[in-house]
Amino acid sequence: EIKGSPADYIIKETTDGKIVENKKAGLAVRAPERWDVKKIEDEEGAVNFYSSNIDVESREGKIVLPIKNGCLIQTNVVYKKMDFEQIKQEAKRTHIMLGVKSDEFEEIVINNHNTLKNVFDIHKYGSGMGIYIPLKNKGYAFYLYWALDEKERCVQEFESFLETISID
């Protein structure tokens, strides 16, 4: 089984803004304008994108949800073959353990990729949305979390962000 690592992610400053690339996974995505980008140094690696007005608690370098102000996008790649049903079951299991209040799934298309969209509300962490793109032997995941009164703006930013995803 192939494992990802934080070293797979490269953050580049370009004239088009901040671009995050993961050549191993064939992924490139552009950060929303004026957002900060930070690599997460865990075993598999991930990248967080923060709106400029973010206010969130962190413990030992890790974000503690819910967000008090602003928007947070997190992306990661899992190196295993999964279909929508397996992804759905895994998400539901995780959400149940965290105390889910609501959990909705729908299949949509983003940039010509069949995608599973999950909108959830979890007691401890607040509301969020997950976008899952399973391709061959990889799963691409993009999560959005928002502060209570910022859902509309954050979802709008997330939709624009998703349009910049390029997967080889």
Image (cartoon, rainbow, N blue to C red):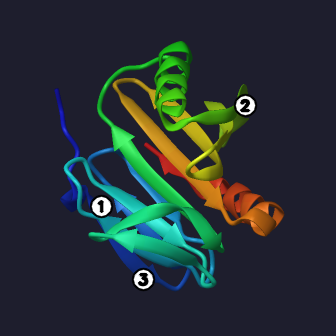
Q: What amino acid is found at the position of numbered circle 2 in the picture?
A: Ile
The residue carrying mark 2 is 108
Q: Is residue 113 visible?
A: no
Above or below, 113 against 163 in this view is above
Q: Could you say which is closer to the camera, residue 153 or residue 31?
A: 153
Residue 13 placement: quadrant: bottom left
User: Mark 2 Cα within 10 Å, few/some/many (few <14, many 20+)?
Assistant: few
Mark 3 or mark 2: which is in front? 2
Residue 61 placement: quadrant: bottom left
Q: Residue at x 48, y 42 (%)?
A: 141
Residue 9 placement: quadrant: bottom left
Above or below, 15 against 164 in this view is below
Q: Residue at x 36, y 20 (%)?
A: 81
Q: Residue 59 appears at what percent x and percent y?
A: 33, 69
Q: What amino acid is found at the position of numbered circle 3 in the picture?
A: Glu
The residue carrying mark 1 is 9
Q: Which mark is residue 13?
A: 3
